[in-house]
Structure formats: C-alpha cells, structure tokens
Amino acid sequence: MAASDEQLVAILVDRARSEGLQLTGEGRLLRQLTKRVLESAREEITQALPPAFADQLFTAREQGATEQQLQQIAADGLAQMYFRANNSRAHGLGVEFTDVERLDIEL
C-alpha cells in the first residue's frame, strides 16, 4: 500500500473512532467500505488468466458451450487469480458474472 493510501486509511479510521463508530461487525464501517470498493472495482477489472482457464474457455466454446457456461469458466478464473490471489486469500469466495456489458478476451 502506498504511503498516501496508508495515510488516508489512518485518517478514516481515526475519524471513525473519534465519532464512536464501530469498525468491524455486521453493517459496520469495514463492511461498508469493502462493499463500496468492490462495487467500484467491478466496473472494470483487467486480469490475466492462467493458460488452463484459457484452454478451458476455448475447448468449451469449440464443444458448443452456452454463453452462461463460458462466463462461469471466466468467473472461476477471475475468482482464483484476482479475488483469491491465486488461492492465497479469500478461500471459499464465490464469483459470478452479473450485468456483464462486455467481456474482452485477448491472447
């Protein structure tokens, strides 16, 4: 995290504590911030997928997979590489595509 980001977080936490806000727990500041960050990030995510997921996508397409099936393969790859950081965090997190306007796949 950049120094300016750390300062911003420190200011936010200090302000929340001084105003008596709870940081953790259901409906608390941390949960609200996480939700807002994820909602803003969902507008555009660029992530390279491992060759195994690309292979699955192309094989499934050649075998006549539906758009929904292809999106699920891409969502699984995105979950592993972006949200779970190649399985180093967020274990058990499920990802699905909703309201997809555009999905670009480049080689």
Image (cartoon, rainbow, N blue to C red):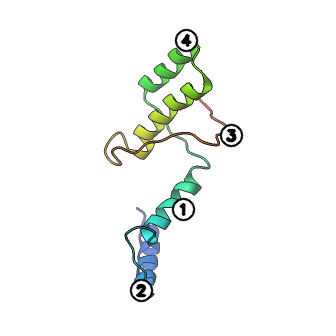
**92 left or right of 100 in image:** left
Mark pair 1, 4: CA separation: 38 Å
**Whole-percent x and y of residue 24?**
37, 70
Badges 3 and 4: C-beta atoms under 8 Å apart? no
Residue at image mark 4: 63
Residue at image mark 1: 36
Image position of 91 with respect to 49: above or below: below
Image position of 28 with respect to 15: above or below: above
N-terminal of the pair, mark 3 or mark 4, is 4
The residue shown at (33%, 48%) is 89
N-terminal of the pair, mark 4 or mark 2, is 2
Mark pair 1, 2: CA separation: 21 Å
Badges 2 and 3: C-beta atoms under 8 Å apart? no
Quarter occupied by the N terminus? bottom left
Circle 3: element type: loop
N-terminal of the pair, mark 1 or mark 2, is 2
Q: Crowding near pointer 1: few (<14 within 10 Å), some, many (20+)? A: few
| Disc sitting over residue 74 in the figure | none
Residue 43 can be seen in this image: yes
Residue at image mark 3: 101
The residue shown at (60%, 42%) is 98
Image quadrant where residue 104 sits? top right
Residue at image mark 2: 20
Amino acid carrying label 2: it is: Gly
The residue shown at (47%, 38%) is 78
Circle 1: element type: helix
Residue 107 can be seen in this image: no
Amino acid carrying label 4: it is: Gln
